[in-house]
Amino acid sequence: MIFVREASAAVVLVTLTLSLQCAGMAADIVALHVLQILLWAGFYRWLCFPLWESAFYFSTSSYATVGYGDVVLPWMWRAWVRWKVPSAC
């Protein structure tokens, strides 16, 4: 009977520990993705777009998909994007 109680406690503790570690890693990954999107949004805002909304939207849509085409880079930056990602334009 004591073994069953101790084994049950061990299973519960290991399960909770594993759950916490998985949640922490998922939060870290999401935070890293958001930081990358914000880094590129800052670059786009600095050199390409006059508004933060456009820069953040373009950064997010380009990061998550191939972009929608409703917001595009200025002409001088499009050649750079074509060189980096051939299917971008």
Image: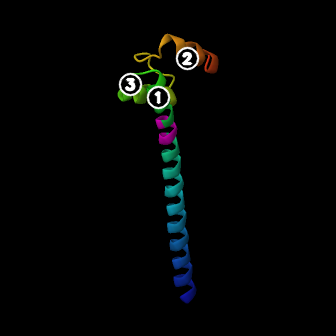
Residue 49 image position (x, y, % from top left): 42, 21
How many discs appear? 3
Mark 3 burial class by Cα count in 10 Å: few <14, some 14-19, many 20+: some
Q: Which residue is mark 3?
A: 54
Residue 89 shows up from this direction: no
Q: Residue at x 54, y 89 (%)?
A: 2
In the image, residue 72 sits, relative to residue 46, either above or below, namely above
Mark number displayed over residue 28: none
Q: Residue furthest top?
A: 75
In the image, residue 56 sits, relative to residue 27, either above or below, namely above
Q: Which residue is mark 1?
A: 59
Q: Main secondary structure of the magenta part?
A: helix
Q: Residue at x 55, y 17 (%)?
A: 88
Q: CA distance from mark 1 to mark 2?
A: 13 Å
Q: Secondary structure at mark 1?
A: helix
Q: Secondary structure at mark 3?
A: helix
Residue 81 image position (x, y, % from top left): 57, 18
Q: Which residue is mark 2?
A: 88
The residue range painted magenta reads 34-38
**Type of amino acid under label 1:** Ser
Residue 53 counted in the magenta span: no
Q: CA distance from mark 1 to mark 3?
A: 8 Å
